[in-house]
Structure formats: C-alpha cells, structure tokens
Image (cartoon, rainbow, N blue to C red):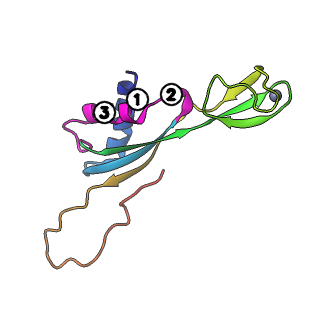
Amino acid sequence: MHEYGLAEGVLDSVRQRAGGRKVAGLRVRFGVRHAVDEESLAQAFGFVAEGTEAAGAEVKLITVPATLTCQDCGQTAETSDVLAVCPHCAGENVDITGGDEMTLESITYEPVPAAAPSSSAAPSSSAAERG
Ligand SMILES: [Zn+2]
C-alpha cells in the first residue's frame, strides 16, 4: 500500500498549513500516475494522522489526468490511463506527460467552539484555503 507514504506527505503539508487548527477535511489532487485509490488514501491518512490535529479528517481525492501526445499524428488528449494509446490513430507511439503531481488543494477546519454566546460575527474567511 504505497498510499501510506503518500498520506504522510499529505499530512506534512496539512500540518504546516493548519498550524494547530483542528482539521475537518481536506482535498488533495493526485496525478493519475500515482494510481491512488481514494478509499485507501483516506484509510492510510486516518492511520498516519492519528493523534494529530488532522485525526479523523475527511479526505477527498481528485485524480488529475495526464496529457497524451501522439508522436505519429500529433494528437494531444487528456488520459487517465498511463498505458493509453492515441485516441486518434490508435498508435502506441505516445508521450505521457504530467499526471505525477501531488497538490494539497484545500483544507476545511473544524469550527472553533463559540465560547462567548454573544458572538454573531462569522469569522469564516479562513474556512477553506487555496494554495
Ligand atoms: Zn495518433
């Protein structure tokens, strides 16, 4: 299960950004080359995040396609299959580029418990961060 190594990388990024805030959920983008399964990643993340501020966070996986370029006909296409053939001429002389990224897209934080009952402001501007 290579998801454990990936989950540790994700956890590092999450903890750097979270700065001690309790993490409710996160979205990560993995290139298709990583061949990550959302369920396995979520399971692995739950394991490595145990005892941290990200424990129990919901993991959403977005798989990023790779780009296929055909050397025979010049066709380019997105592909989620790194063993793909050209969709235009069915040639196997294709370059697959990209699809190897790993990006922490956003983090959702647990709402801070309202200690003061008079709070009516909604300091939610940092509920989701993009980077
Ligand atoms: Zn082609």
Residue type at numbered disc 1:
Leu
The residues colored magenta run: 31-55
**Residue type at mark 2?**
His
State if disc 2 and disc 1 touch (CB < 8 Å). yes
Q: Is mark 2 within 8 Å of ligand 1?
A: no
- Residue 88 spot, x, y in % from top left: 80, 32
Chain-order first, disc 1 or disc 3: 1
Residue pointed to by mark 2: 34
Residue 118, horizontal then vertical, whole percent = 16, 79
Other residues around mark 3 within 10 Å, as few (<14) / some (14–19) / many (≥20): some
Which element is circle 2 on?
A: helix
Circle nearer the N terminus (1, 2): 1
- In the picture of the structure, the residue carrying the numbered disc 3 is 43
Say which residue appears at 68% left-offset and 37% top-offset: 78
Residue assigned mark 1: 6
Q: Which of labels 1 and 3 is toward the front?
A: 3
* 43 is higher (above) or lower (below) than 112: above
Q: Quadrant of the N terminus?
A: top left
